[in-house]
Image: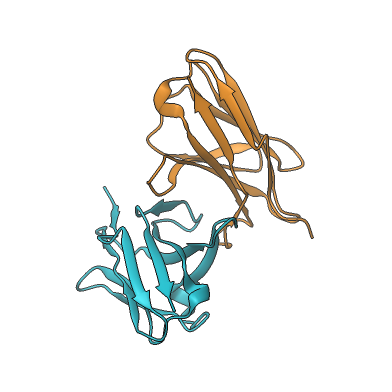
C-alpha cells in the first residue's frame, strides 16, 4: 500500500505566474482534500474533491482551482500568483464519509 | 464561523513530567475533534479523535462541550513526544478539517 505522494517537493514562481501542484492519493481512497499552510500557522482547508467533483470549499478565491481524475489523483492550480501564496501545500486523501485523512509530505511554494 | 484556538505556541517540559496541550473551539453544533501530530521530518498524522475515545501513545483527550475544549494530556512525557501538535475540528461527515495554529512541544531529559 503506497501512501499519499505530492509533486514537486519545492518550486519557486514569480508573482503573476500560474502553478500546478499534484497529488496521488493513497490506494483505495476516493476523496482528496487540499490545505495551505503558511509559515507558523496551522493548515487551512482549500477544497475537497470526491469522485471528480468539488465537495466543499474553504475561504479561498476562485484563482485557486482543482481537479480530480478517475484514478483519484488530484491537481491544485493557482493562477495570478501573489506573494502571500507562498506556503506549504498539503494534500490529504481519505475514504468517503468520515475516513481518516492521510497527509502527503507537501509542496513548498515560494512566490517572488 | 468555527474557530480552533491553541493558546500555547511552545510548551517545554521535562521528561517524566505531565504535559497538557490546550485546545478550545467555537462552533454551535456538534463537531468532531482531532489531534494531529507532526514529528521532525515526518508528515502530519492523526494522533487521536474524540469519537474513538482511545489512548494513543499514552495521550488522552476529553471533549468538554460545556467549556468547548479538547485538551490533550499525557501523565509522563517522553523525549519522543517532542513534536508539533495541532488540534483540528470537523463539522461535517466528510472530514474537512479546520486546524489551530499548533503547539510545539519540547521534552528535555
The answer, for residue B72, to whether it is visible in the render is no
Report the residue at 41% width, 86% height from top.
B16
How many labels sit on residues? 0
Residue B27 position within the rendered picture, expressed as x and y whole percent measured from the top left: 26, 58
Residue B45 position within the rendered picture, expressed as x and y whole percent measured from the top left: 56, 62
- Closer to us: B57 or A63: B57
Q: In which quarter of the view is residue B72 placed?
A: bottom left
- Closer to us: A18 or B51: A18
| Residue furthest right as drawn | A1
Q: Which chain is cyan?
A: B
Scheme by which the image is coloured: by chain
| Residue furthest front as drawn | B109
Residue A82 position within the rendered picture, expressed as x and y whole percent measured from the top left: 43, 20
Q: Is residue A16 left or right of residue B101?
A: right
Residue B85 position within the rendered picture, expressed as x and y whole percent measured from the top left: 43, 63
Seen in the picture, residue B43 relative to B69 is either above or below; the reply is above
Report the residue at 75% width, 38% height from top.
A70
Report the residue at 67% width, 50% height from top.
A30
Seen in the picture, residue B89 relative to B59 is either above or below; the reply is above
Seen in the picture, residue A63 relative to B31 is either above or below; the reply is above
Q: Which chain is orange?
A: A
| Residue furthest left as drawn | B67
| Residue furthest top as drawn | A16
The answer, for residue B88, to whether it is visible in the render is yes
Report the residue at 65% width, 38% height from top.
A9
Q: Quadrant of the C terminus of chain B?
A: bottom left
Amino acid at each position: 500500500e503506497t501512501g499519499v505522494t505530492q509533486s514537486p517537493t519545492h518550486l519557486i514562481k514569480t508573482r503573476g505566474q500560474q502553478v500546478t501542484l499534484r497529488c496521488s492519493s493513497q490506494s483505495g481512497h476516493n476523496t482528496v482534500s487540499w490545505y495551505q499552510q503558511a509559515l507558523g500557522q496551522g493548515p487551512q482547508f482549500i477544497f475537497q474533491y470526491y469522485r471528480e467533483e468539488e465537495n466543499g470549499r474553504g475561504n479561498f478565491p476562485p484563482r485557486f482551482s482543482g481537479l480530480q481524475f478517475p484514478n483519484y489523483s488530484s491537481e491544485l492550480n493557482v493562477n495570478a500568483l501573489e506573494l502571500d501564496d507562498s506556503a506549504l501545500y498539503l494534500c490529504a486523501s481519505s475514504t468517503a464519509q468520515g475516513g481518516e485523512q492521510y497527509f502527503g509530505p507537501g509542496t513548498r511554494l515560494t512566490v517572488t | 464561523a468555527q474557530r480552533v484556538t491553541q493558546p500555547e505556541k511552545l510548551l517545554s517540559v521535562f521528561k517524566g513530567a505531565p504535559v497538557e496541550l490546550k485546545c478550545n473551539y467555537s462552533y454551535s453544533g456538534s463537531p468532531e475533534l482531532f489531534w494531529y501530530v507532526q514529528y521532525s521530518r515526518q508528515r502530519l498524522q492523526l494522533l487521536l479523535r474524540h469519537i474513538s475515545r482511545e489512548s494513543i501513545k499514552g495521550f488522552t483527550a476529553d471533549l468538554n462541550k460545556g467549556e468547548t475544549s479538547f485538551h490533550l494530556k499525557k501523565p509522563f512525557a517522553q523525549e519522543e513526544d517532542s513534536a508539533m501538535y495541532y488540534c483540528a475540528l470537523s463539522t461535517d461527515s466528510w472530514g474537512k478539517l479546520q486546524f489551530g495554529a499548533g503547539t510545539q512541544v519540547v521534552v528535555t531529559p
